[in-house]
Amino acid sequence: MTVLVVRGDREFLVEPGEDFGTDLGVLDVPEDVQPGDTITTHLDEPFEVRRLRSPDLFHHMERTGAPMMPRDIGLVVGHVGVQSGDRVLDAGTGTGVLSAYLGRMGAEVTTFEQKAEFAEVARENMALAGVADRVDVNSGDVVEAIDERDDFGEFDLLTLDTQDAPDVVERAPDLLADGGFVAVYSPFVENTREVVEAARDTGLSNVESQETIQREMDFDDRGSRPSTRGVGHTGYLTFARNV
């Protein structure tokens, strides 16, 4: 059971029984370490032990590219109402952050990543997240798999973060259960327009696109205002439903 040890702004993933070196000394992690424990380095510097939660995984998973941001994942989850037992077809696994979030919520996820080396990293990340039994990481093209396989069955949700998302959306009525959702993330508005057009052409309902923007607040002695650091834009989310 991988755990997180924390001291101020220092955070490290450690394994039970591991000797782990830090700038504050070496941690001798007990075999029976549990969240809530306090363990100390050989220099008697204390670290708090925490259970890994999904936001921690976003920061500590091995990355193969830019993962979907937690705020975008939150919009997907809130919009489509993911729940335990849902079947999800995901494409564009990447680091696997979205798949890990969905798996930890109890969904059964089948995800496709075109690059074999990225898929292998995603499998390791699913093991770290404790969802390797609920997230099946496949290496290959999702469109080809849809066209070649007849054993998928019905899904409750399609989550797509790929350039060929419009091609998958065209096949959505054959993949989704009645009332099932499509959720597509795209960094580019051109691809988003293609997704919207595909969803409308194929007869999906409740087609909606949003730009996702979030800004932090600054509070100081002069007053309070939105932060001027960065624009807070991440991308575009499109939703549709099979009804």
Image (spheres, rainbow, N blue to C red):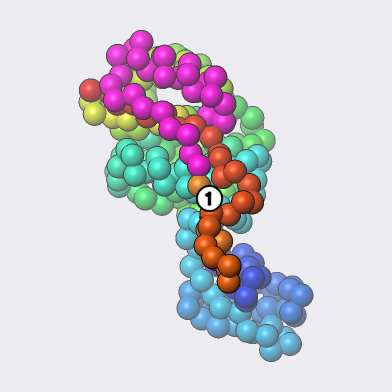
Give residue 154's position: percent from left, percent from top: 30, 26
Give residue 166's position: percent from left, percent from top: 47, 17
* Residue 226 in the figure: left or right of residue 243: right
- Can you see residue 190? yes
Residue in the foreground of this view, choosing between 235 and 8: 235
- Taking the magenta stretch, the answer to whether it contains residue 211 is yes
Residue in the foreground of this view, choosing between 136 and 228: 228
- Can you see residue 158? no
Where, quadrant-wise, is the C terminus in this rendering?
Answer: top left
Instruction: Characterize the local packing of mark 1: few (<14), some (14-19) or many (20 or more) Cα atoms within 10 angstroms.
Output: some
- Taking the magenta stretch, the answer to whether it contains residue 198 is yes
| Residue under the image location 35 percent in, 49 percent down | 106
Q: Residue furthest front?
A: 222
Q: Quadrant of residue 157?
A: top left
* Residue 173 in the figure: left or right of residue 70: left
Q: Examine the rendered structure and indicate whether residue 191 appears above or below residue 51.
A: above
| Residue under the image location 33 percent in, 39 percent down | 79
Q: Quadrant of residue 59?
A: bottom right
Please give the range of residues in magenta.
Answer: 185-213
| Residue under the image location 45 percent in, 29 percent down | 184
Q: Examine the rendered structure and indicate whether residue 221 appears above or below residue 80.
A: below
| Residue under the image location 72 percent in, 86 percent down | 42
Numbered disc 1: secondary structure: loop
Give residue 81's position: percent from left, percent from top: 30, 42
**What type is the residue that disc 1 sits on?**
Arg
Name the residue carrying label 1: 215
Residue in the foreground of this view, choosing between 220 and 187: 220
